[in-house]
Amino acid sequence: MSEPKKVSRRQFLNYTLTGLGGFMAAGMVAPMVRFAIDPVFKPSAAGEFVSVADVEELSNEPQRFEWEIEQVDAWYESKVQKTAWVYRSENDEIVALSPVCTHLGCTVDWAASEEYPNQFFCPCHAGRYTKDGVNVPGTPPTAPLPKYETKVEEGMLYLGEAIAR
Amino acid sequence: MLQKLYDWVDERVDVNPIWRDIADHEVPEHVNPAYHFSAFVYCFGGLTFFVTVIQILSGMFLTMYYVPDIENAWNSVYYLQMEVAHGQIVRGMHHWGASVVIVMLFLHTLRVFFQGAYKKPRELNWVVGVLLFFVMLGLGFTGYLLPWDNKAYFATQVGLEIAAATPVIGDQIRTLLAGDQSIVGAQTLTRFFAIHVFFLPAVLFVLLGAHFILIRRQGISGPL
Ligand code: HEM
Ligand code: FES
């Protein structure tokens, strides 16, 4: 058995003062750090369904529809414009695609390139997607266009969140 | 582990003398409350600095949410206090600290005055101290407008009228501070924000540096 180590007066004071100082500093800094990182812990806003179009208007050809949502950005509330490309698919499903390119976020357009009249085209780096929103291999985008949640009520088409695929 | 890291750096850069020069000084007996309890009056300078550090830290964090714009300033302060975690604490630190720092500064000044510590050779540091006092008042005055509520607005209105009472150039000073000849508004808020957050803190750092260098060179004044 070795002799129990003696803590000198100097060591004791050093440990106590460092501990106390550390405790005080932590008490000061902790609220500020929590304050700063708060955005990470905020619950993400759940999307509401918004009436966008009359289902009668829809066809087999993708059409552009625009609508507005109320956006609450901390202390700033504003209306923000949203866009979707909507069409009826062969098996009569309603498909609503987000126009935001999955490469770097430009806005894609239906049949905007003369060479590819049956595709979505992104003007920024010539990214392309087939009609169902799947990215064409060999072009810059690496994922399909996000699909909006859809709902039909009393002949109106309602769109919710755009879900990444 | 930490010791090894320290040794590694010290071996190459020789940091030891740097922090020894800053921190390793004897506390004279007459300044140490462990010997004479009444020596606690020597703490007020350090306490002023401590609260100033809190002001700077909490102020830096407040600017993460605060916007100096008349449409949004009040809303951003309301949001950071009511909706952000610990917002009430961080704003509270800055709000109450602003008053506590003046109290500490005042007690520190009283100690220096009644001990005659400002006498030769320390006259210069008294001058630096008075400048520090004005900077603190300026920080309090400009910061008070930032929440852009009624109290802030009318306090600034009054403050600007006081500035306008300066002989000869009063109106010019008022316009310079308010950013407009008749309105206390958008430009007043942006100016006060810039002064509060950039200009005065910069001056504060220079003066604090001078204050501490002078203390280090001249030492603390002797026992009464
Ligand atoms: C000794 C230094 C300082 C003093 C005495 C001081 C004083 C004040 C005062 C009295 C207010 C009004 C607070 C209220 O009514 O709740 C305020 C607000 C503010 N200060 Fe300072 N301040 C100091 C340093 C700083 C620094 C260094 C920064 C930023 C880098 C800063 C940023 C702010 C901001 C963003 C506000 C508005 C937010 C609010 O009102 O709660 N302050 N300050
Ligand atoms: S952003 Fe669409 S292709 Fe690059």
Image: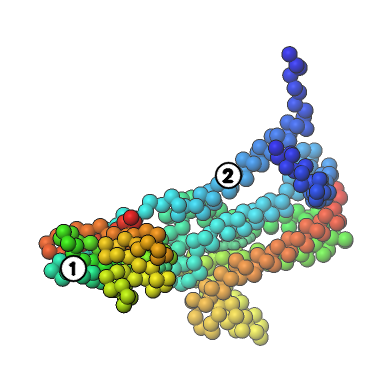
- In which quadrant of the rendered view does residue B163 lie? bottom right
Whether tag 2 and tag 1 are in contact, CB under 8 A, the answer is no
Q: Quadrant of ligand 1?
A: bottom right
Residue B108 left/right relative to A136: right
Res. A115 image quadrant: bottom left
Single out the mark in the foreground, 2 or 1. Answer: 1
Q: Say which amino acid is labelled 1.
A: Asn
Which residue is rendered at x = 39% and y = 71% of the image?
A126
> A2 and B149: which one is in front?
A2
Q: Are marks 2 and 1 on the same chain?
A: yes
Question: Residue sitting at 32 percent across and 65 percent down?
Answer: A129
Residue that label 1 marks: A60
* Chain under disc 2: A
The percent coordinates of residue B70 (x first, y second) are 46, 72
Where does the N terminus of chain B fall, quadrant-wise? top right
Question: In the picture provided, is B141 more to the left or to the right than B116?
Answer: left
Badge 1: chain ID: A
Q: Residue A123, percent across and down? A: 39, 74
User: What residue is drawn where x is 65% and y is 65%?
Assistant: B201
Judge whether residue A39 can be spotted in this image. yes
The image quadrant that residue B95 belongs to is bottom right
Badge 2 is on which residue?
Answer: A27
The furthest residue to the bottom: B168
Name the kind of residue labelled 2 in the image: Gly
Residue B99 appears in the figure: no
Along the line of sight, the residue nearer the viewer: B3 or B33: B3
Q: Residue at x 69, y 57 (%)?
A: B105
Colour mode?
rainbow
